[in-house]
């Protein structure tokens, strides 16, 4: 071989190597984001754990070891070193009330005001930042924490609220305090009679003190104006920021008003949604969505509709959940079916209309007979319209009849449950319904054993939005009163892995999105959270203190505690 031939061979070799490198570069663009040096819990059984994730645009493109994922690095790739912290799929809250929750954040907080002076100071501070014409609401005050524990009066707050109407409620919801502006707007004077079922508290001269009990609060409720579009926008933005701060990247808004959806749609157009939303208006308006001809999960990755929320009965605490047997020591009260179930044929018709339109049905049912009645109706819908992938849901599914677990599974009904309610209601449930029925209350383990799919949520604003409290509740079942440190009906505890799966894949399945989110899997939306501690190895009772450090939605960092100072 002469020199000339050598030269040719080397040239051919170099050219093909160059071409190969180029074609590889073309088939693999550089990632926009790499999170490396993490403990990745994927919730994906094919790759249970990994150390790094690469994201291109808004989707995950690689999950694996730091070295494997590093192959996706390019000159413009943002690389985040997680410092060995745990990375989870973003939490998906399958049942909440997003705008009521946001309103609660917006309200003045008085629950831990331990003196009348502190109570007045907080209301005064709020008045300074309240736009003209808006009411100061909320509160949850508790005068039993004061010394002496006397009811607050308008005199306490009038001086700091000369212009703003105030109506702050007691924590139990049975009483509120109005200031003089609010009393004037409601037309309440010394001459106003007590309404049936209510009391206007008066001083020795007969003048209203501002405290109003039960039905007397209706006088005020009637004059509080409905919230404007701008107010609703501010409330939703606050809720979005709060959701990002606790690692909630998807929410399913049960009973959303159309005005709420209008705000979501506006934010979606402006690319300002930092939480994905599935909104389910009330089934009482099923005709509207049926007329539009949209089906379940209609929309895009940030905003979907196509579900309806129905009510079958009431709640345990108020004695209105519908049971086969009476509540203990409440005479023959066994609760009530809701007005939507009077007559049952009314609900049957609405279910039928919703299902025929391809809408997803989510029904609130808490008592054992309430749940059983809904399962009967669901079975009728399936029989009438034929088998289909409809993912019927029962919201809360709180007190199960033993006979219904199998039926729940056979009908492929999803149990959309809120574990925090278990550690809250667990304080008093047995005194209301006895040991036997309590043993099938929030029976998460029994559901899984029967092959029922769980979706986790909170019912925010009724319970806290923070997912760590829900995981803690499902894993420990330690009631809030501290009386069951080893768990209330501990045989129903879930493992941390099961709780995380129900809160991510389970909730994604419940909104027909299991191929789009719910696990850290190549191809899925890059919704992820980095948390302060490894919830799989710390003591379960410490899970409630774990904080979210970073929240990614579609690869976008929407919360970064490492960059926010002072927290
Ligand atoms: Zn709810």
Image: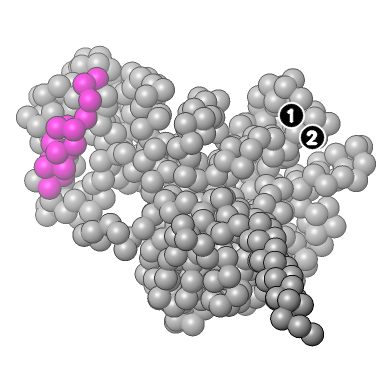
Of residue 266 and residue 14, the one placed in the foreground of this image is 14
Q: Is residue 438 magenta?
A: no
Q: Residue at the spot x=54%, y=71% of the render? A: 70
Say if the magenta span includes residue 129: yes
Q: Which residue has dot 1 on it?
A: 294
Image coordinates for residue 135, horizontal then vertical, percent: 27, 27
Q: Name the spot of residue 355 as percent of width and height, x first.
A: 80, 35
What colour scheme was applied to this rendering of the protein? one colour
Expressed as whole percent of the image width and height from the top left, the position of residue 11 reads: 70, 71
Residue that mark 2 sits on:
358
On screen, residue 247 versus residue 238, left or right, reads: right
Between residue 167 and residue 523, name the one nearer to us: 523
Establish if 252 lies above or below 548: above
Q: Which mark is residue 435?
A: none
Q: Which residues are magenta?
A: 118-133
Q: CA distance from mark 1 to mark 2?
A: 7 Å
Is residue 440 visible in the rendered structure shown here? no
Q: Please determine whether, in this image, residue 73 is positioned above or below residue 260.
A: below
Whichever of labels 1 and 2 marks the residue nearer the N terminus, that label is 1
């Amino acid at each position: 071989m002469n020199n000339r031939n050598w030269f040719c061979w080397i040239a051919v070799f170099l050219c093909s190597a160059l071409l190969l490198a180029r074609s590889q570069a073309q088939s693999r663009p550089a990632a926009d984001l790499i999170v490396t040096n993490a403990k990745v819990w994927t919730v994906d059984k094919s790759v249970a754990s990994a150390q790094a994730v690469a994201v291109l645009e808004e989707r995950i493109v690689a999950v694996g070891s730091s070295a494997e994922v590093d192959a996706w690095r390019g000159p413009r790739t943002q690389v985040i070193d997680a410092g060995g912290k745990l990375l989870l799929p973003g939490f998906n809250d399958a049942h909440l009330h997003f705008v009521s929750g946001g309103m609660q954040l917006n309200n003045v907080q008085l629950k831990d005001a331990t003196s009348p002076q502190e109570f007045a100071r907080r209301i005064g501070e709020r008045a300074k930042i309240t736009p003209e014409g808006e009411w100061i609401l909320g509160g949850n005050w508790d005068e039993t924490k004061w010394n002496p524990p006397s009811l607050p009066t308008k005199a306490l707050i009038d001086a700091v609220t000369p212009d703003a109407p105030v109506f702050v409620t007691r924590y139990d919801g049975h009483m509120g305090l109005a200031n003089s502006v609010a009393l004037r707007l409601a037309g309440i004077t010394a001459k106003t009679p007590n309404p049936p079922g209510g009391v206007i508290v008066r001083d020795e001269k007969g003048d209203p003190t501002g405290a109003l009990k039960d039905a007397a609060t209706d006088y005020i409720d009637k004059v509080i104006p409905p919230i404007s579009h701008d107010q609703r926008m501010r409330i939703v933005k606050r809720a979005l920021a709060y959701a990002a701060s606790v690692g909630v990247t998807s929410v399913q808004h049960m009973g959303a008003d159309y005005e709420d959806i209008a705000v979501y749609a506006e934010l979606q157009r402006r690319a300002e949604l930092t939480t994905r939303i599935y909104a389910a208006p009330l089934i009482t308006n099923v005709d509207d969505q049926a007329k539009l001809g949209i089906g379940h999960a209609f929309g895009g990755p940030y905003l979907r509709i196509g579900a309806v929320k129905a009510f079958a009965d009431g709640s345990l605490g108020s004695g209105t959940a519908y049971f086969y047997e009476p509540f203990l020591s409440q005479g023959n009260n066994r609760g009530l079916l809701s007005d939507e179930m009077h007559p049952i044929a009314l609900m049957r018709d609405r279910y039928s209309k919703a299902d025929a339109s391809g809408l997803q049905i989510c029904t609130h049912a808490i008592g054992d007979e309430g749940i059983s009645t809904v399962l009967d109706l669901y079975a009728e819908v399936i029989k009438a319209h034929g088998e289909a992938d409809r993912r019927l849901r029962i919201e809360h599914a709180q007190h199960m009849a033993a006979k219904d677990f199998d039926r729940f599974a056979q009908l492929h009904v999803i149990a959309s449950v809120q574990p925090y309610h278990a550690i809250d209601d667990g304080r008093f449930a047995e005194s209301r319904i006895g040991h036997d029925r309590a043993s099938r209350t929030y029976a998460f383990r029994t559901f899984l054993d029967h092959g029922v799919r769980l979706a986790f949520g909170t019912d925010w604003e009724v319970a806290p939005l923070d997912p760590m409290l829900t995981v803690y509740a499902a894993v420990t079942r330690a009631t809030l009163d501290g009386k069951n440190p080893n768990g209330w009906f501990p045989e129903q505890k879930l493992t941390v892995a099961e709780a995380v799966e129900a809160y991510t894949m389970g909730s994604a399945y419940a909104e027909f999105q299991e191929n789009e989110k719910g696990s850290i899997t190549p191809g899925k939306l890059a919704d992820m959270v980095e948390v302060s501690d490894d919830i799989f190895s710390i003591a379960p009772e410490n899970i409630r203190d774990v904080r979210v450090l970073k929240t990614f939605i579609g690869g976008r960092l929407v919360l970064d505690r490492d960059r926010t100072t002072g927290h």
